[in-house]
Image (cartoon, rainbow, N blue to C red):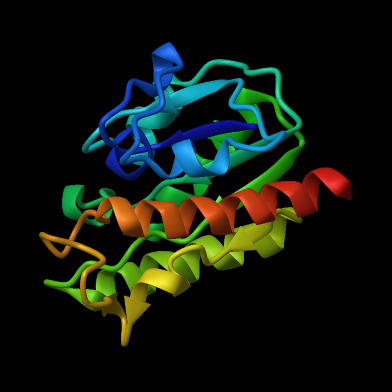
């Protein structure tokens, strides 16, 4: 499995260096036969940042958790979709899991709109859309105890996301 993302993926690790921190969903997803083979993540990254930084990775499945920061930087949904297409093309992995972004408690409509763009993109491209945030969300906001700041998942929430994405990766890999 390869992964590309922002602070939700990077968390307390160093994804480009292959270091998975325990507060990242990756530390739960990359277990029991699912091996992290590489990728890129950085806190605050937009999809444009990701596209500029990603490199090819040898993996069976690519997980992209991207788009959270785009609206904050004025990037429209069309740009997010174009950048994600570019990320997938540049990484070079055919099987893709495109993950929903987490809630944004201060403005829930932003995450809802971003997820609509991502879900449509996944359908258009034949990728799997995974709403790995369903288990940490209540009424378009973080469920109690799932975020300390209304933006980032807690360690417990990261584990929920990781379990969901691990299942999606295994389903895609098993074909």
- Quick check: 175 left or right of 55? right
Q: Which residue is the extreme one toward the top? A: 17
Q: Say which residue appears at 41% left-offset and 17% top-offset.
A: 16
Q: Is residue 31 visible?
A: yes
Q: Is residue 26 above or below residue 111?
A: above
Query: Which residue shows up at 36% across the image and 40% down it?
Result: 24
168 vs 55, left or right, is: right
Return the residue nearer the eye: 86 or 110.
110
At horizontal 60% and vertical 59% (from top left) the residue drawn is 121
Q: Quadrant of residue 9?
A: top left
Q: Position of residue 115 (x, y in %)?
A: 44, 67
As drawn, which residue projects farthest toward the front?
A: 32
Above or below: residue 174 compared with residue 123: above
Residue 57 location, x and y as percent?
A: 63, 18
Q: Percent x, y for residue 41?
A: 37, 29
Q: Residue at x 53, y 33 (%)?
A: 3
Residue 82 image point, x, y percent: 51, 45
Along the viewing direction, whichever of 110 and 40 lies nearer the viewer: 40
**Apparent side of residue 49 relative to residue 90 in the rendered image (left or right):** left
* Badge count: 0
**Front in this rendered view, residue 145 or 123:** 145
């Amino acid at each position: 499995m390869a992964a590309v993302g922002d602070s939700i993926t990077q968390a307390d690790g160093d994804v480009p260096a292959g270091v998975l921190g325990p507060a990242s969903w990756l530390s739960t997803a990359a277990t029991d036969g699912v091996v992290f083979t590489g990728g890129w993540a950085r806190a605050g990254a937009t999809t444009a940042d990701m596209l500029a930084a990603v490199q090819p990775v040898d993996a069976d499945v690519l997980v992209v958790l991207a788009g959270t920061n785009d609206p904050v930087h004025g990037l429209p949904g069309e740009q997010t979709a174009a950048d994600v297409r570019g990320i997938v093309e540049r990484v070079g992995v055919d099987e893709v899991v495109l993950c929903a972004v987490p809630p944004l408690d201060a403005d829930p409509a932003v995450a809802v709109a971003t997820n609509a763009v991502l879900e449509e993109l996944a359908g258009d491209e034949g990728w799997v859309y995974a709403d790995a945030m369903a288990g940490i969300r209540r009424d378009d906001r973080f469920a109690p105890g799932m975020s300390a700041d209304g933006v980032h998942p807690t360690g417990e929430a990261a584990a929920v996301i990781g379990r969901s994405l691990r299942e999606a990766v295994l389903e895609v890999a098993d074909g």
